[in-house]
Image: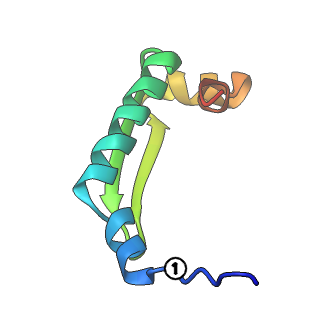
Amino acid sequence: MSKVFKLNKSGVRRLLKSEEMKKMLSEKADIIVGKCGDGFESDHHTGRNRVNILIRANSVKSYYKNLKENTILKALR
């Protein structure tokens, strides 16, 4: 006999939008920005479904460095 697992959707939604999740993701983003070097920054916002983290180049030099070397993508490894 198999048991049925029912996901608590409202609980998961609260978890994904919580301050704890934002703090954890911000810490991870800071580590990634540190690996990228100068010229990169992270930002966060709470969307409709979850907390979103954005890592981007904040200067023209780092923008083109990321285009040429995939700096952000490599920092995710």
Residue 50 screen position, x and y as percent:
41, 66
Q: Quadrant of residue 52?
A: bottom left
Residue 62 screen position, x and y as percent:
52, 23
Q: Residue furthest front?
A: 1
Left-right relation of 61 to 49? right
Q: Quadrant of residue 48?
A: bottom left
Query: Compared with residue 25, is residue 45 higher up or lower down, i.e. above or below?
Result: below
Front residue of this view, candidates 15 and 65: 15
Quadrant where the C terminus sits is: top right
| Residue that mark 1 sits on | 7
Residue at point 27%, 51% (across, down): 20
Q: Residue furthest right?
A: 1
Residue at point 59%, 80% (across, down): 5
Residue at point 42%, 35% (across, down): 29
Q: How many marks?
A: 1
Residue at point 64%, 84% (across, down): 4
Disc 1 residue type (three-letter): Leu
Secondary structure state at the residue bearing disc 1: loop
Query: Compared with residue 5, is residue 15 higher up or lower down, i.e. above or below?
Result: above
Quadrant where the N terminus sits is: bottom right
Q: Quadrant of residue 26?
A: top left
Give the colouring mode of the picture: rainbow
Residue 28 screen position, x and y as percent:
42, 34
Query: Compared with residue 61, is residue 12 higher up or lower down, i.e. above or below?
Result: below
Residue 45 screen position, x and y as percent:
32, 58
Query: Compared with residue 75, is residue 12 higher up or lower down, i.e. above or below?
Result: below
Could you classify mark 1 by the number of other residues whose Cα lies within 10 Å: few (under 14), some (14-19), or many (20 or more)? few
Q: Residue furthest left?
A: 19
